[in-house]
């Protein structure tokens, strides 16, 4: 490489790298990138959420919708009443308070295919200084915007067929959402008297609420069941230690799967779950990873230190067990831009819930690489935090490849006193994974269409930067949907590789959209081009059945 090119690449890196402000790069004479962060990544604290980040979802390229429950928060309206929802701009670390009238306590959410976000269910009426109407059967719409003008629209009650506290939402191929399980009121653990062993859809489908015996069989550890929409059109549903493949269109159990070894994995013994990346190279074969959990509902209970991974493509799927490196409950597993899974948050003892139930916070992030062989999948020793994030914390991967980490509120009422063992947490952290420090440049993409139709091919422009002379085999293209983060759940989270062809001059890529809606249910994703494991910035793109389907 000639010096002139070297300078121009460094210049590009400064222009486009999100790390431009404090460029960590230095170069040896052999032009190898040396960054102190290239191994462990970097953890930075910056910004405050204003409301406790019990639930969070990425709305578009700049904004995050944060939802708490009706309670005291530092973000308040002029009236002195506490806010319990804000729109957070991660590019400026500023938030805008959003009025909300129904209690969103431990609710769920997902996007419809037309781009509107739907929040489902919640909790009890609240009086006095943080007024709220009951949210048990509420449906709330929020249509994303960039202009700071969008607001909540609430359909306060009688929208769902039943009260749903701790339900799971998953976005479906049909462009609607399924709402699964929950309880009729707040409870430390599910009980027959409050269990809601059924599912329904929003917008409502004919037939209303449908009984799901699985939610009887998995008592009492089945609130916030893990649900993933599978490429074959069925659902994977997991609660407690049990799981099945379920045909929601015909209310039929397709296959019962074996119990996962180890402890129960669902609330309040909360573990986490991820559907590993879907790849056309193996015909979208599905593997599910479930990690962590806790032994019982005692404040000093030991967390589970294992993960199980099951290959749904096997004729008789079995759980292959692996370490989780640490015992951990209430972990957050989020896809990084390169398809590996970052695990953050949680603790080593106790159970999910308020007031003294969470102990020994886990400060160390871990990265899980599902493509590596058993025994080589975990990376530890990453940049850690000193903020305890346990019950009611969240994490979301951002379009720029960083991870936004917020929340932790395990005291009721909230307590920000330094004397509190684990104070209510409003601070935001950004984790920059090692891939942001690996190379002086990251791939640049432009001319990404806003909407593409299933199976269509489209062209984008690309600059592979320092990879001049690139090997096309090192180029990957993927779609990331970060999903709705709450209670270790990442509802509708998805990572799908796309077929593509790099042009001979390496200036453009022809990409094939996901072939059908079961592979990537309609709606937004972030298009990422990777070169040698270094991701471009994610560009928001909508995948839809037709050009008229997107309403925003
Ligand atoms: C399932 O649970 C519901 C609510 O807890 C209960 O009313 C019903 O009898 C249960 N059904 C079975 C078959 O156990
Ligand atoms: C916060 O916690 C501290 C220490 O336990 C306690 O003294 C204080 O009363 C609590 N404040 C509130 C508002 O509960
Ligand atoms: C999306 O569809 C839902 C359900 O039909 C509708 O209520 C909502 O208004 C639509 N969103 C937009 C932005 O048109
Ligand atoms: Cu909760």
Image (cartoon, rainbow, N blue to C red):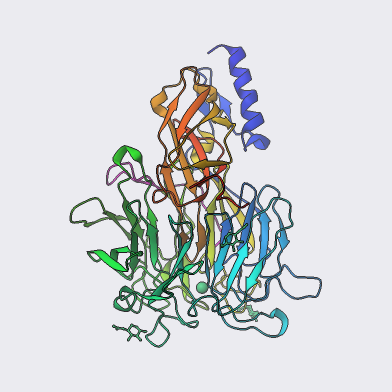
Residue 195: percent from the left, percent from the top?
40, 81
Residue at image position (58%, 41%) is: 450
Q: Is residue 376 magenta?
A: yes
Residue 177: percent from the left, percent from the top?
47, 63
Residue 182: percent from the left, percent from the top?
44, 76
Q: Is residue 223 left or right of residue 157?
A: left
Q: Taking the image as drawn, is residue 346 in sight?
A: no
Q: Please tell me whether residue 173 is drawn above or below residue 26 in the rendered image.
A: below
Q: Which residues are magenta?
A: 368-388
View extreme (left): residue: 316
Q: Nearer the viewer, residue 503 or 247?
A: 247
Hey, which quadrant is residue 158 in on the image? bottom right
Q: Main secondary structure of the magenta part?
A: loop
Q: Is residue 96 left or right of residue 534?
A: right
Residue at image position (56%, 64%) is: 118
Q: Is residue 21 magenta?
A: no
Residue 418: percent from the left, percent from the top?
64, 70
Residue at image position (59%, 18%) is: 6
Residue at image position (31%, 43%) is: 376
Hey, which quadrant is residue 417 in on the image? bottom right
Hey, which quadrant is residue 461 in on the image? top right
Q: Is residue 179 left or right of residue 7?
A: left
């Amino acid at each position: 490489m000639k010096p002139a090119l070297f300078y121009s690449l460094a210049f590009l890196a400064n222009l486009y790298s999100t790390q431009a402000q404090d460029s960590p790069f230095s170069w040896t004479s052999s032009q190898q990138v040396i960054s102190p962060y290239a191994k462990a990544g970097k953890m930075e604290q910056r910004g405050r959420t204003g409301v406790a980040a019990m639930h969070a979802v990425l709305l578009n390229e700049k904004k995050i919708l944060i939802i708490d429950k009706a309670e005291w928060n530092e973000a308040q309206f002029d009236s002195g009443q506490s806010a319990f929802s804000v729109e957070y701009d991660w590019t400026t670390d500023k938030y805008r308070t959003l009025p909300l009238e129904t209690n969103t306590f431990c609710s769920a959410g997902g996007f419809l295919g037309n781009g509107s976000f739907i929040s489902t269910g919640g909790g009890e009426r609240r009086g006095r200084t943080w007024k709220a109407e009951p949210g048990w059967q509420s449906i709330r719409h929020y249509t994303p915007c960039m202009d700071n003008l969008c607001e909540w629209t609430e359909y306060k009650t009688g929208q769902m067929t039943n009260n749903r506290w701790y339900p799971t939402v998953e976005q479906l191929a049909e462009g609607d959402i399924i709402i699964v399980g929950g309880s009729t009121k707040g409870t430390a653990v599910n009980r027959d008297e409050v269990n809601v062993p059924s599912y329904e859809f929003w917008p409502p489908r004919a037939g209303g609420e449908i009984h799901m015996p699985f939610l009887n069989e998995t008592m009492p550890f089945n609130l916030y069941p893990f649900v993933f929409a599978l490429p074959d059109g069925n659902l994977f549903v997991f609660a407690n230690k049990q799981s099945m493949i379920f045909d929601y269109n015909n209310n039929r159990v397709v296959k019962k799967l074996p119990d996962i070894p180890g402890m129960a994995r669902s609330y309040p013994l909360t573990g986490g779950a991820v559907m590993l990346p879907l790849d056309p190279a193996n015909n979208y074969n599905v593997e599910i990873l479930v990690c962590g959990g806790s032994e019982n509902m005692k404040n000093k209970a030991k967390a589970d230190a294992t993960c199980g991974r099951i290959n749904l493509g096997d004729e008789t799927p079995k759980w292959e067990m692996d370490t989780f490196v640490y015992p951990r409950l209430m972990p957050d597993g989020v896809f990084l831009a390169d398809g590996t899974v970052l695990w953050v948050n949680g603790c080593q003892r106790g159970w999910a819930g308020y007031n003294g139930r969470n102990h020994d916070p886990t400060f160390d992030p871990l990265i899980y690489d599902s493509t590596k062989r058993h025994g080589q999948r975990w990376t530890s020793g990453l940049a850690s935090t000193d903020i305890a994030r346990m019950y009611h914390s969240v994490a979301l991967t951002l379009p720029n490849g960083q991870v936004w980490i917020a929340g932790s509120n395990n005291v009721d009422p909230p307590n920000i006193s330094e004397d509190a063992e684990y104070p209510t947490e409003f601070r935001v952290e950004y984790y920059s994974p090692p891939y942001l420090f690996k190379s002086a440049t990251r791939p640049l993409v432009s001319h990404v269409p806003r909407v593409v139709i299933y199976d269509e091919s489209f062209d984008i422009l690309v600059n592979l930067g320092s990879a001049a002379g690139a090997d096309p085999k090192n180029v990957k293209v993927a779609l990331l949907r970060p999903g709705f983060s709450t209670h270790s759940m990442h509802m509708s989270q998805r990572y799908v590789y796309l077929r593509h062809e790099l042009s001979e001059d390496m200036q453009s890529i022809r990409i094939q959209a996901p072939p059908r809606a079961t592979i990537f249910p309609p709606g937004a994703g972030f298009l990422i081009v990777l070169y040698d494991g270094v991701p471009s910035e994610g560009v928001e793109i909508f995948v839809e059945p037709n050009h008229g389907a997107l309403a925003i």
